[in-house]
Amino acid sequence: SASGIAYLPVLPRCCLVIVGGGPVGKAVGELAADLEFDVWVVDDRPEFVAEERFPRASRRISGPIDRVLPDLAVTSDTYCLIVTRGHGHDQNALYHLAPTAAPYVGLIGSARKIKLIFDSLRESGVAASALARVSAPVGFDIGSQTVPEIAVSVVAELIARRNLGPKGLPRKSGV
């Protein structure tokens, strides 16, 4: 600026709960921490939430998903990403997170897997309106082939949601 004063934006501090400490969760956690997300990681395997694996996470929570997630403080500043190691764990996590106050709940997976999980959750009594809020498959379609590329696509979607609000997430087809 002409006066010599630069203004730097102060980004809202969002908490990102990553359910699943595998390769995609780890890569997303590292990138999200670089981009001012307060990263929490949840996995039922203690070694997958270890400090060595997630050195920049502010919380590392190990325990069964159906015990940990109901007690987690999910607010309107909490984004949730489900990237566990399997269909059953993903479904269990989504059962607990879809109905919360989280403005963003993302689920990784193929269209077929997502449809199966959504159908099962509807049969279990999860409201269609709660499932309609879920971003699935998660991430922007950039033709991702590798774990780092998947992380970029997911974190780009998180940034769009944080910076642009609901309009930052285009509706996805097929779900």
Image (cartoon, rainbow, N blue to C red):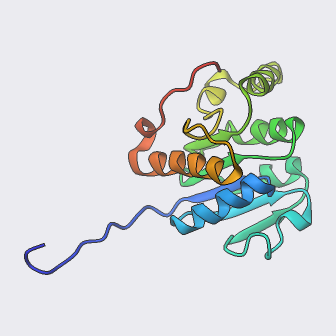
In the figure, is residue 150 to the left or right of 122? left
The image position of residue 108, as x and y in percent, is 71, 39
Residue sitting at the far bottom: 4
Badge count: 0
In the figure, is residue 104 to the left or right of 107? left
The image position of residue 173, as x and y in percent, is 58, 20
Of the pair 152 and 124, the residue shown nearer to us? 152
The residue at 71%/42% (across/down) is: 97
- Establish if 31 lies above or below 99: below
- Establish if 93 lies above or below 60: above
The image position of residue 45, as x and y in percent, is 92, 60
Q: Image quadrant for the N terminus?
A: bottom left
- Establish if 159 lies above or below 36: above
The residue at 81%/64% (across/down) is: 61
Of the pair 146 and 171, the residue shown nearer to us? 146
The residue at 59%/53% (across/down) is: 78
- Establish if 10 lies above or below 172: below
The image position of residue 74, as x and y in percent, is 65, 52
Q: Image quadrant for the C terminus?
A: top right
The residue at 88%/52% (across/down) is: 67
